[in-house]
Amino acid sequence: MLTCLLTAPAADTVPLTLLTKDALDGWLTAAPAAEAAWVRRLGFKATPGSTALIGGADGALVRVLVGVAEKLDIWSLAGLPGSLPAGSYVLDTALEPTTATAVATGWALACYQFTRYKKSTKSFASLVLPANADAAAVQRFARSATLVRDLVNTPCEDMGPPELAAAAEALATEFGASFSVIVGDDLLAQNYPMIHAVGRAAEKAPRLIDIRWGDAAHPLVTLVGKGVCFDTGGLDIKPASSMLMMKKDMGGGAHALALARMVMDAKLPVRLRVLVPAVENAVAGNAFRPMDIIPTRKGLTVEIGNTDAEGRLILCDALAEADSEKPALLLDFATLTGAARVALGADLPALFSNDDALAAEIAAEAAATDDPLWRLPLWQGYRPQLDSKIADLNNAPGGGMAGAITAALFLEQFVSKDTVWAHVDLYSWNASSRPGRPEGGEAMTLRAFFNVIAKRFPPVA
């Protein structure tokens, strides 16, 4: 069990009473007079997120009232672990299973701290796991979200391509999966020229991480994640202000690994493959240049319109390899474009898909799990913007419009029309702390995509 979740109450466990505004008067009427008077004196109105701590005659805490909305979600109680006095707490009312699992998950996520470089003295309140909660599901997601947060929060000095590969290998070992990696010039020998070109200027060599797991008889699900461990922009160098958070540019790779962790932990009946091209887009004498023309694994040539549009370049080689096996489902995750953030903001990842049924399933699960995203179109009217006069494609169309869409259209050129594919352009970062979501690296869309995979490929009864 996670450290901030308990399996059973102790003698001093304090009950949490969840109250909506409409239910408060009824509770005050039924409560002991002294408690009701105290709550009235506090001015407690049961607004969502508010609390009222009730003490006994000996001064000990005997109950906490918690204001909630009519509908509970994953974040409804996420402000409590860090704000309540240290100790253990238990909900005094039963919740239906989905809600119980959601609030327990939010509680677990709220207890996250990144302490690799700075110790913390902060302690968190513990919650007795609600009776109807799915303990395995809570732990599965909380640990996978922690993986994303830890990987993204770690700076490139300690999370470059070799270290990201080591984290992937540790994950593979944990679940008995096979692991392989292609490093440096071997990428050229094995026909991954784009991954090599983008990463060749860095001191730490580029590589392609490859994990395989599951029964060969099961349907193939392939996850691809952008692993740019730091992005200077290359020779089209970013300004300092834009470079500050570029340790998070491997967030797509972190998400692919975390979703793989969930799939393997749940033992879903799929044959899983994970591909993460891991590079540092650095500046050196051998860096790839604007206007260079570089071949891809698929055979298409790409004119480099901008070296800072590097994520789609490494992904195109990985997607071509993934597509060659004709997976039943192909998903890719990337911190790809600022245009997606301009369009949808930091909290709402952009979804692109060549399959309407898949997109509808993803949207439904996103809504059901409070794990939001928003579909944008693969608008073919913008496809000519990718044309080059001297190569098959240009990686960075001019004009500055519809950048998230043209990036997705670029990736689409490396996926067969009959492959069921979705691409997620996500931020993977919280700019400021909110209940359950501390500032720093963040997991997005994992719950939604796990549910899609689990429902598409359910265990055989």
Image (tube, rainbow, N blue to C red):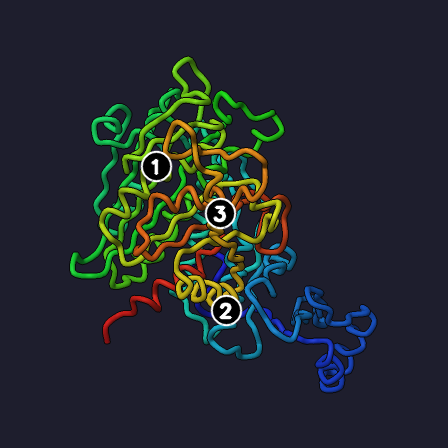
Viewer-nearest of labels 3 and 1?
Answer: 3
Alpha-carbon neighbours of circle 1 within 10 Å: few (<14), some, or many (≥20)?
many
* Residues marked 1 and 2 touching at CB (< 8 Å): no
- Residue 209 position, x and y percent, is 29, 38
The image quadrant of residue 210 is top left
Q: Which residue is mark 3?
A: 425
**Front-lying residue, 335 or 296:** 296
Q: Which residue is mark 2?
A: 368
* Residues marked 3 and 1 touching at CB (< 8 Å): no
Q: Which mark is residue 55?
A: none
Q: Which mark is residue 277?
A: 1
**Front-lying residue, 386 or 364:** 386
- Residue type marked 1: Pro
- Residue 263 position, x and y percent, is 32, 58
Alpha-carbon neighbours of circle 3 within 10 Å: few (<14), some, or many (≥20)?
many
- Residue type marked 2: Ala
- Residue 38 position, x and y percent, is 79, 73
Q: Residue at x 52, y 48 (%)?
A: 442
**Front-lying residue, 161 or 64:** 161
Q: Residue at x 48, y 62 (%)?
A: 5
